[in-house]
Image: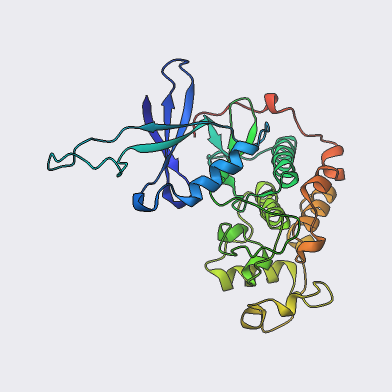
Amino acid sequence: EKLEQIGEGTYGRQVFMAKETETKEIVALKKIRMDNEREGFPITAIREIKILKKLHHQNVIQLKEIVTSPGPDRDEQGKQIDGNKYKGSIYMVFEYMDHDLTGLADKPGMRFTIPQIKCYMKQLLTGLHYCHINQVLHRDIKGSNLLIDNEGNLKLADFGLARSFSSDHNANLTNRVITLWYRPPELLLGSTKYGPAVDMWSVGCIFAELLNGKPILPGKNEPDQLTKIFELCGTPDELIWPGVTKMPWYNNLKPPRQLKRHVKDAFKHFDFHALDLLERMLTLDPSKRISANEALDSEYFWTDPLPCDPKSLPKYEAS
C-alpha cells in the first residue's frame, strides 16, 4: 500500500513510503525505471540488487525484497498489450529510515555535539569498512545517502553507483561518479584505476562538514572543484603523490602556481585528534589516504568525549 513519495534516488528513481499490508510495517519503495523495456531489466538496477543481496550489516541499508505491480493489460486506445512488453512497475523494497544526515544537519539551529558527530562517523566508517572488505565501492557517499532512523542508527544507502572491485585493480572504472563536492582528486584528474580510497575522500568531506556546519569544497564545476581542493590541500607533485603528473587530465587542469597545504590552518578550531584524522582522510595521494578500518582505530574515537550510544541520540521530527 503506497503512502507518499519521499525522494529521488540516483538517476531520478522515485522513492515512496509504503505499508506492508500483512505486517503493517512501514517500508521504502524505490521504483526501477523501465524506460527501455526492449533492452530488458536495466543493468544499473541488476548491479545494485546484486551488491545489496550480498551485504548484510547494521550500518548498510537492507534490501528486503523486489516486488512488482501489474501494469494495464490494454493501452490508451483499448488495444490488448503485447505480453512481451512489460508495462508494470518494479520496486525495490527497503527498510524505512526516518531521516538522512543532510536533512538533519539542515534543520534550523541544528549543531551536532562532538559525541554525536563521533557516533555518526563511527557508524559510517563501520558500514563502509564492511563494504570494502566485501569488495564493494559505494562511489556516492554524501549526507543525503546516509540514512538515520529514530533509534540513532546510521545506514549507508543508495548503491545505484556502487560496484564490486577485484583485488587485481586492472579493471577500468568510470571516473564520472561521486557527487562533485565529495569527489576525490584522482577522479577529477581522470583516473580509471582506483579503489576504496575514493570513498574515504568523501568521508573526509562529510566529517569536516559535520564539524564545520557547511560543505568545505563546494565547487561549481570539475576544474573549479580541483582548484578548491588544491587551495585547501596544496598542489600535488611527484614528491607528495608519485605518478600524479602522468594522470590523464593533469596537464590540462594543474594550477598555474604552486599552492601550499593548509588544512590545519583552515580548521584550526577543530580539536587535535579530529584534525589529525581529517588530514589523513584528505590526503591527495590515494595510496597514502587512511582506510576505513585504520580510521576506526584513530585516537579520535578513543578519547574524551567518547562517541555517544546511538540510542541516546535525540529523536528528531520527520525530515
Q: Quadrant of the N terminus?
A: top left
Residue 34 coordinates in the image, percent (x, y): 37, 47
Residue 158 coordinates in the image, percent (x, y): 55, 44
Residue 256 picture quarter: bottom right
Residue reaching furthest to the front? 83
Residue 125 coordinates in the image, percent (x, y): 73, 43
**Placement of 55 over or under 231, stated as above or below:** above
**Placement of 142 over or under 304, stated as above or below:** below
Residue 233 visible in the picture: yes
**Placement of 147 over or under 274, stated as above or below:** above
Q: Nearer the viewer, residue 298 or 57?
A: 57
Residue 102 visible in the picture: no
Q: Residue at x 74, y 27 (%)?
A: 309
**Placement of 56 over or under 186, stated as above or below:** above
Q: How is the image coloured?
A: rainbow
Q: Nearer the viewer, residue 312 or 169?
A: 169
Residue 44 coordinates in the image, percent (x, y): 50, 51
Q: Residue at x 22, y 41 (%)?
A: 81
Q: Residue at x 84, y 76 (%)?
A: 239
Residue 51 picture quarter: top right
Q: Nearer the viewer, residue 102 or 246?
A: 246
Image label count: 0
Q: Residue at x 18, y 39 (%)?
A: 80
Q: Nearer the viewer, residue 214 or 95?
A: 95
